[in-house]
């Protein structure tokens, strides 16, 4: 990992991480959690740990890319998390200039030219889009690709304020579902792991539920493969800062559901929720969402990010969120 000390500070890796976290929170990102290092580095460490990190800071601005080779053997710069492209690798008003400085410095000192630079998390018509065109328009062809729409819910006014922005029918359904679940004996347990052991224990419980869910039984859940390792790494990265929020739905002495996500400042990003298939008639998923929102409101969180609306299975998010943030990926190809 490298840091460009153009601001006169030598800096350490931990200081750079703190600046990266702060920039993700303060630069009005559509998805600040997925822009922050816990998400970005977890993906990098699981998917392509051998790729070189280029993480540099200048004042309050940060750039965070991975240097790789494409199928033609040409050098490219990619976001660390490039599967969903939720986060942005350029943070702060000097980030685009910093990117250009670093790219030109590598071209001069190492005789290495990046044929392509991919910038994810760009908001259409935003300040970053303008800066990219200004700095790279003369030397690069720019291709813009829509990557989806993030949705979010304001938590202004606490739980009552959040519910006031939902439909009357949605509120009635939640009230009826909660009474049915409580009458059945379903209870909820909050977990905030802050050590490696607590994280491992909580994650084992999560996977135990996932195996009994429709996703797990269908072989498309997060209990194996990349997803299992990625979320495990992400949760371990969140532990020192107490950034994870996990809730289990329980019946008697058995976990029957879970929801978890993480905080970037006072903005929460949901990650996964699931429940045992034999409990689906009790709307465990909806109740877990409400329990998480109640917890966040108690803590004074400002926003609940639910991620993208993609396909029919994500339509439920329209009932839970009222804000929309379209995103683009910009591909800069050297002329």
Image (cartoon, rainbow, N blue to C red):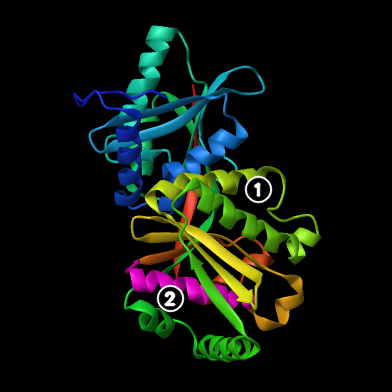
Question: Can you say which quadrant of the picture contains the N terminus?
Answer: top left
Residue at 30%, 27% in the rendered image? 12
Residue at 71%, 56% in the rendered image? 221
Q: Which of 59 and 190 is in front in this view?
A: 190
**Reading the chain from its start, which is encountered first: label 1 or label 2?**
1
The residue carrying pointer 1 sits among few (fewer than 14), some (14 to 19) or many (20 or more) residues within 10 Å by Cα, namely some
Most common secondary structure along the magenta stretch: helix
Secondary structure at numbered mark 1: helix
Q: Name the residue under label 1.
A: 228
Q: Which of 253 and 194 is in front in this view?
A: 253
Tell me if residue 291 is in the magenta stretch. yes
Residue at 32%, 69% in the rendered image? 300
Q: Name the residue under label 2.
A: 294
Quote the CA–CA distance across marks 1 and 2.
Answer: 27 Å
**Displayed quadrant of residue 317:** bottom right
Over which residues does the magenta segment extend?
284-301
Tell me if residue 151 is in the magenta stretch. no
């Amino acid at each position: 990992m490298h840091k460009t000390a153009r601001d006169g500070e030598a800096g350490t890796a931990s200081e750079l991480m703190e600046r990266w976290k702060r920039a993700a929170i303060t630069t009005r990102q559509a998805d600040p959690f997925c822009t922050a290092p816990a998400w970005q580095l977890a993906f990098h460490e699981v998917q392509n740990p051998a790729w070189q990190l280029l993480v540099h800071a200048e004042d309050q601005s940060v750039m965070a890319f991975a240097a790789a080779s494409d199928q033609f053997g040409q050098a490219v710069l990619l976001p660390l998390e490039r599967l969903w492209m939720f986060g942005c690798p350029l943070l702060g008003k000097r980030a685009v200039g910093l990117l250009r400085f670093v790219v030109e410095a590598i071209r001069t000192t190492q005789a290495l030219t990046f044929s392509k630079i991919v910038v994810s998390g760009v908001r259409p018509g935003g300040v970053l889009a303008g800066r990219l065109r200004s700095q790279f328009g003369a030397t690069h062809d720019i291709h813009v690709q829509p990557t989806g729409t993030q949705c979010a819910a304001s938590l202004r006014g606490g739980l009552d304020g959040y519910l006031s922005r939902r439909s009357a029918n949605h509120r009635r359904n939640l009230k009826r579902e909660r009474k049915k679940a409580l009458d059945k004996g379903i209870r909820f347990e909050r977990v905030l792991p802050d050590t490696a052991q607590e994280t491992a224990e909580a994650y084992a419980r999560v996977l135990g539920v996932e195996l009994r869910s429709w996703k797990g039984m269908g072989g498309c859940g997060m209990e194996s493969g990349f997803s299992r390792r990625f979320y495990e790494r992400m949760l371990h990265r969140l532990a020192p800062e107490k950034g994870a929020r996990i809730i289990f739905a329980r019946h008697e002495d058995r976990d029957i559901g879970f929801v978890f996500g993480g905080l970037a400042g006072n903005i929460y990003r949901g990650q996964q929720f699931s429940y045992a298939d034999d409990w689906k008639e009790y709307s465990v998923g909806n109740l877990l969402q409400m329990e998480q929102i109640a917890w966040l409101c108690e803590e004074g969180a400002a926003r609940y990010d639910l991620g993208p609306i993609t396909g029919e299975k994500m339509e439920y998010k329209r009932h839970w969120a009222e804000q929309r943030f379209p995103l683009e990926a910009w591909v800069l190809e050297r002329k």
